[in-house]
Image (cartoon, helix red, strand yellow):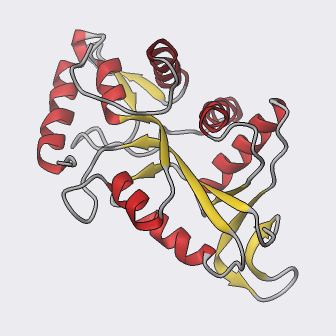
């Protein structure tokens, strides 16, 4: 096991470990290189950074939604909020989370934004449910790098009157610096006053990769990247 600390979603350590490993094994693309090395693709392996996990099928997006839903139920409980999926990647994730939550007995509304405001038909910036004053919004994103996308979402959502964002859920916390030496998640939490939860973080990924010594080169590449670009506080 890696000596790195991680704080992704999870109750007890046993649940957390099973949850994270299951996530990493249940999503993402696996390719085998010419030398037989299994590669788990969660972004740009060239420099050790991680993006989305290459979700391309119905089964994959359904599975991903289930993991987000587990995180939601653990952190938020059965509280009904409104899910917001920022265009574009956040849209299918938010829908899959809403479906997964409904299968667990919690029917929550969702909506998303348009990149360009529509001036005909239903028009407007948002598509789907219209949040009402007093309701809480949960942002569903893929990853956090510098926190720019979350800040853009907050600007967009600021046009809705009487609502507040109560949490953000992301797929992978890359543990990179934000605008300062602090982690982007920490900066967002301090700036806006709501928690940011990740299904897994880069250290969970390192732990998973370290299970196979064939991944040693990739693991070292990631660690070298984090040594330069990782959050220091």
Of 8 and 62, the residue lying toward us: 8
55 on left or right of 134: left
Q: Residue at x 70, y 42 (%)?
A: 97
Residue 139 in the image: state x and y as whole percent. 60, 56
Q: How many marks?
A: 0
Who's the residue at 43% across and 41% down the image? 172
Residue under the image location 29 percent in, 44 percent down: 49
- Name the quarter where the N terminus is drawn: top left
- Above or below, comparing residue 197 to residue 34 in the picture: below
Q: Is residue 122 visible?
A: yes
Residue 145 appears anywhere in the view = no
* Image position of 71 (left or right of 25): right
Tell which of 153 and 58 is nearer to you.
153
The residue shown at (26%, 65%) is 179
> Height in image: 125 above or below 77?
below
Position of 202 with respect to 196 (left or right) is: left
In the rendered view, would you say 189 is above or below 127?
above
In x, y percent, where is residue 8?
A: 43, 33
* Residue 148 x/y as whole percent: 40, 66
Counting from the top left corner in percent of width and height, residue 210 is at 26, 16
Q: Residue 57 falls in which quadrant of the image?
A: top right
- Front residue of 165 and 125: 165
């Amino acid at each position: 096991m890696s000596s790195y600390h991680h704080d992704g979603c999870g109750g007890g350590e046993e649940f957390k470990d099973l949850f994270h490993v299951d996530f990493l094994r249940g999503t993402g693309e696996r390719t085998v290189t010419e030398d037989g090395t299994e590669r788990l693709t969660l972004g740009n392996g060239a420099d050790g950074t991680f993006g989305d996990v290459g979700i391309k099928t119905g089964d994959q997006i359904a599975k991903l939604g289930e993991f987000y839903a587990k995180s939601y139920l653990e952190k938020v409980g059965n509280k009904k909020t409104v899910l917001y999926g920022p265009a574009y990647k956040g849209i299918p994730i938010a829908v899959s989370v809403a479906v997964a939550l409904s299968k667990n007995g919690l029917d929550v509304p969702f909506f998303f934004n348009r990149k360009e405001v529509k001036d005909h038909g239903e028009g407007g910036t948002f598509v789907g449910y219209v949040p009402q004053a007093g309701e809480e919004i949960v942002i569903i994103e893929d990853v956090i790098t510098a926190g720019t996308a979350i800040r853009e979402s907050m600007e967009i959502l600021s046009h809705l009157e009487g609502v507040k964002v109560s949490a953000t859920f992301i797929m992978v916390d890359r543990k990179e610096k934000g605008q300062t030496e602090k982690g982007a998640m920490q900066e967002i939490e301090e700036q806006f006053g709501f928690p940011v939860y990740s299904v897994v973080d880069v250290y969970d990924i390192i732990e998973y990769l370290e299970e196979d010594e064939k991944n040693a080169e990739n693991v070292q590449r990631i660690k070298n990247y984090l040594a330069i670009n990782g959050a220091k506080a």
